[in-house]
Amino acid sequence: MRKSLHFNADGTFKIVQFTDTEFCEPDREEMQMKAMMRRILETEKPDLVVYTGDVIASNKSPNPIQAFRDAVSVPEELHIPWTAVFGNHDSEAADMTREQLHNLQLSHRYCYAQPDPPNVHGAGNYALEILDRQQQPAAALYFLDSGSYSPLEHLRVGFYDWIRRSQIAWYTETSYRLTTQNGGSPLPALGFFHIPLPEYNDIWDFSVCYGQKLDTTICAPWINTGFFAAMVEMGDIMGTFVGHDHANDFWGTLHGIRLCYGRTTRNAYLDQPFTTGARIIKLTEGVRSFDTWLHLEDGTIVLEQPEHQPEGRRLRS
């Protein structure tokens, strides 16, 4: 039987975004992280959990398959639907491919991911619909594989990978189909992937943003394949959610789309205090917007993040 997502009786749908958990081997830190994840899920009671990449650090793990099972064990044990996209660290081990990871997540009882569409680059590209009381699609969630490392690094073209043209074609075709089925009106939608788009640089440099940028560099790809332009043209995706840069949790709006970082769930690679946690996202049926806030490890709920004004640069309208 096909799994389906539904808006609640009160018209809401809540998502918890975990990112960069990088499970590798059971130890005290991972036990504490799982305890935090459980506290957040028991408090927020979400309808869906989304892991936005680097679910595991496969090259550090003696058993990447078990590491992945550990990473998703909390929503599995709590019987909460969950999905995942993959990051650069997920498939660094020689014996762990992204295709294997995607098949692994599909084997879990409470995983709501879908098999990959044919002839689309990467592993873990799929869309999910959220149904209303009449069992009709009322919102959509897009999940894309943003890859790992630049295939053109030997030509000194960046370090990290990018969303490819076949993925953009798949997204636009899926969006067009859902829009047509909805009488020509785009469904309110969100997008989830691991590596931020180049436009994340733009919103921090030229727009008012909310939250922190403690990473020196936004690690976006150097190649811009036009996925953001496709989202603007299709008119459905209201916000995107990424990870990758562990010390960034800001969001800003560009051409009507809110580009958001999650809140790192594991304090890896950071030489400064940065409380771990999760980003929470709430959709409301029939409303073309969403609410979002942070839920931190110590239980703090951050509803309003600090405002950042671009420093000495022209504001973009």
Image (tube, grey):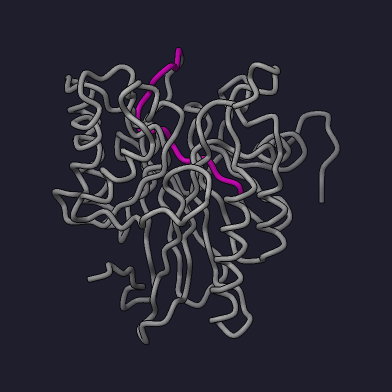
Residue extending farthest front: 119
Magenta includes 264?
yes
Across and down, in percent, residue 87 comes to 44, 33
Residue 30 horizontal/vertical position (percent): 22, 26
In the orientation shown, which residue stands out farthest toward the left? 77
Q: Residue furthest top?
A: 271
Please, what is the dominant secondary structure of the magenta stretch?
A: loop
Q: Residue at x 39, y 46 (%)?
A: 17
- In the foreground, 304 or 124: 124
Q: Quadrant of residue 1?
A: bottom left
* Residue 183: x %, y % from top left: 59, 85
152 in relation to 308, above or below: above
Q: Count how many numbered circles sit on residues in the image.
A: 0
Whether 191 is drawn above or below 182: the answer is above
Which residue is depicted at the point 73% across and 38% down?
202
Residue displayed at 71% across by 47% down: 226
Instruction: Tell me if 46 is positioned left or right of 294 in this view.
Output: left
Residue pictured at 60% horizontal, 73% vertical: 186
In the image, taking residue 61 as reference, residue 152 lies left or right, namely: right
x then y, percent, for residue 188 = 55, 68
Near-viewer residue (190 or 301): 190
* Position of 158 relative to 284 (above/below): above
Q: Nearer the viewer, residue 286 or 102?
A: 102
Q: Nearer the viewer, residue 85 or 280?
A: 85
Instruction: Judge left or right: residue 91 versus residue 257.
Output: left
Whether 68 is among the magenta residues is no
Span highlighted in magenta in the image: 259-271
